[in-house]
């Protein structure tokens, strides 16, 4: 039996599944990231007040660790979404969506952070040339700040844009599923 050219291939269906998985993951992760950012800022402000109910330094440090991991996970999830969107386009024979170079750069730098020279405030490429630290060499000022806060993730990404893109992807998949269900329903009515 020949495959129906109007039906998606199994590989396309799987790729679409992973696009949806990662788009939803980015949205969840963005929410967790926003929550820890808000908590960290509030706790820091309360720490500065030095009331007996204020958080202590250990709590602030714990917030920072959670915040760091959540930001890193958001970048990683968004990168996975980008990769699966490219795969889905490939399966459909469509042009791949443009790659967010800053996302790739941040993901690569974070992925290989353990290879960097580290000081209190920044990660810089190792002194030896070679593949280690390549992403950090491509980073603005050849350094990744280890500080958090501000309007961007790791100095180059807009967290709100990552969330917005993921929402747009989820919406497009839902629209596609709705259109497919509508077409199946109309075909069922025609066959009666």
Image (cartoon, rainbow, N blue to C red):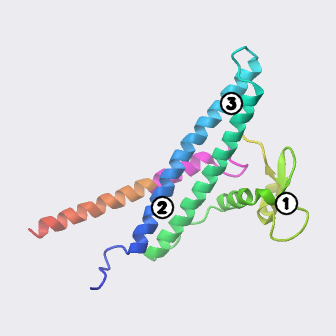
Q: Which residue is mark 2?
A: 19
Q: Is residue 97 visible?
A: no
- Which image quadrant is residue 148 in? top right
Q: Residue at x 47, y 57 (%)?
A: 21
115 left or right, relative to 168: right
Outermost front residue: 58
Q: Is residue 115 visible?
A: yes
Q: Earlier in the sequence, mark 1 or mark 3?
A: 3
Q: Looking at the rendering, in which quadrant would you find the C terminus?
A: bottom left
| Percent x, y of residue 134 | 79, 66
Outermost top residue: 52
Question: Within the magenta stretch, is there residue 163?
Answer: yes
Q: Which residue is mark 3?
A: 41
Instruction: Confirm or deny contact between disc 1 and disc 3 (CB under 8 A).
Output: no
In the rendered image, the vertical position of residue 42 relative to residue 79, given as above or below: above
Q: Residue at x 67, y 46 (%)?
A: 69
Q: Secondary structure at mark 2?
A: helix
In the rendered image, the vertical position of residue 174 relative to residue 92, given as above or below: above
112 left or right, relative to 179: right
- Which image quadrant is residue 97 in? bottom right
Gap between marks 1 and 3, in whole Å? 30 Å
Q: In the rendering, which numbered label is found on residue 125?
A: 1
Q: Which residues are magenta?
A: 150-169
Q: Earlier in the sequence, mark 2 or mark 3?
A: 2
């Amino acid at each position: 039996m020949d495959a129906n050219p109007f039906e998606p291939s199994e590989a396309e269906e799987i790729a679409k599944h992973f696009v949806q998985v990662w788009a939803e993951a980015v949205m969840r992760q963005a929410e967790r990231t926003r929550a820890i950012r808000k908590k960290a800022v509030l706790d820091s402000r309360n720490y500065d007040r030095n009331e007996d109910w204020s958080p202590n330094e250990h709590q602030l440090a714990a917030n920072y660790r959670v915040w760091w991991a959540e930001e890193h996970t958001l970048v990683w999830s968004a990168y996975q979404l980008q990769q699966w969107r490219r795969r889905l386009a490939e399966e459909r024979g469509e042009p791949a969506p443009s790659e967010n170079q800053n996302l790739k750069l941040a993901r690569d730098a974070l992925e290989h952070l353990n290879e960097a020279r580290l000081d209190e405030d920044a990660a810089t490429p190792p002194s030896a040339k070679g593949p280690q630290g390549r992403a950090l060499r491509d980073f603005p000022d050849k350094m990744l700040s280890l500080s958090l806060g501000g309007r961007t993730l790791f100095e180059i990404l807009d967290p709100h844009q990552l969330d917005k893109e993921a929402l747009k992807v989820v919406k497009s998949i839902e629209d596609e599923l709705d259109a497919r269900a509508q077409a199946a329903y109309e075909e069922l009515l025609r066959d009666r």
